[in-house]
Amino acid sequence: MPKKAYFDEKAAKWDTLIKDEVIIRLQNMVSELGLSQGSKVLDLGTGTGVLIPMLMDAVGSSGAVVAIDFAPQMLAEARKKYQWTNLEFLEGAAEAIPLADQVVDEVVCNSAFPHFDDLRRAAQEMARVLRRGGRVTVMHPHSREYINELHASLGGAVENCLLPEEEVMQTIFTEAGFESITLEDVPQRYCLSGRKR
């Protein structure tokens, strides 16, 4: 089964798979980002929109969130739940983000990066849509080891959706045009952050 079909099929039940403790972990991670009121944030690989209320709360009514996913059924679930005037949903792939150059202040990519077909191209696209000095954050509410073991055990469409080693991630994002890259990989948390040069 192709990846898009896999996520479309799971969309209706997706939210039931997200445990409360994971939501709390994500809320903590988003609050630690210290997003500025009034900033424009791209939620790349939004899925059913688990981060949307957290991001909307952080940027406030003067900010904006653009939520993008490649699976139309995932977006449909997110759209059912959330309607704000400063929230926009777009269908698109991370390797060809449907936005102009330098239009967002932050790119947040939660639990989606390993699912992109071309990780290098996705990182380049994140850099393209970010303003100079803008920040990218790739995050998961689990460690790299946990994620990779989970995907391998699920098999099928997500079997090879693995987070690369730290050195490879550093290279991918440095080559894409990011600097000051930090990476935290501990139990119950994975977070890579960098600033666009």
Image: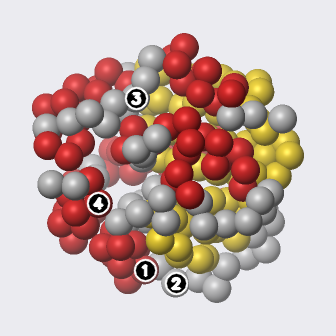
Helix, strand or loop for disc 1 = helix
Q: Amino acid at mark 1?
A: Arg
| Mark closer to the chain start, 2 or 3 | 2
* Alpha carbons under labels 4 and 3: distance apart: 19 Å
Q: State the residue at coordinates (70%, 70%).
A: 64
Helix, strand or loop for disc 3 = loop
Q: Is residue 144 above or below residue 60?
A: above
Q: Nearer the viewer, mark 1 or mark 2?
A: 1
Q: Is residue 28 above or below residue 35?
A: above
Q: Mark 3 highlights which residue?
A: 163
Dividing the picture into quadrants, the one containing residue 151 is: top left
Location of residue 80 in the rendering, given as x and y in whole percent from the top left corner: 38, 83
Q: Mark 1 highlights which residue?
A: 79
Q: Nearer the viewer, mark 4 or mark 2?
A: 4
Dividing the picture into quadrants, the one containing residue 145 is: top left
Q: Mark 2 highlights which residue?
A: 83
Location of residue 89 in the rendering, given as x and y in whole percent from the top left corner: 53, 75
* Alpha carbons under labels 4 and 2: distance apart: 24 Å
Rendered image: mark on residue 4:
4
Q: State the residue at coordinates (61%, 76%).
A: 87
Q: How crowded is the residue under tag 1: few (<14 C-alpha within 10 Å), some, or many (20+)?
A: some
| Mark closer to the chain start, 3 or 1 | 1
Q: Amino acid at mark 2?
A: Gln
Q: What colour scheme governs how the chains and residues are painted in the rendered image of this protein? A: secondary structure
Dividing the picture into quadrants, the one containing residue 2 is: bottom left
Q: Nearer the viewer, mark 3 or mark 1?
A: 3
| Mark closer to the chain start, 4 or 1 | 4
Q: Amino acid at mark 4?
A: Lys
Circles 1 and 2: CB distance less than 8 Å? yes
Helix, strand or loop for disc 4 = helix
Q: Nearer the viewer, mark 2 or mark 3?
A: 3
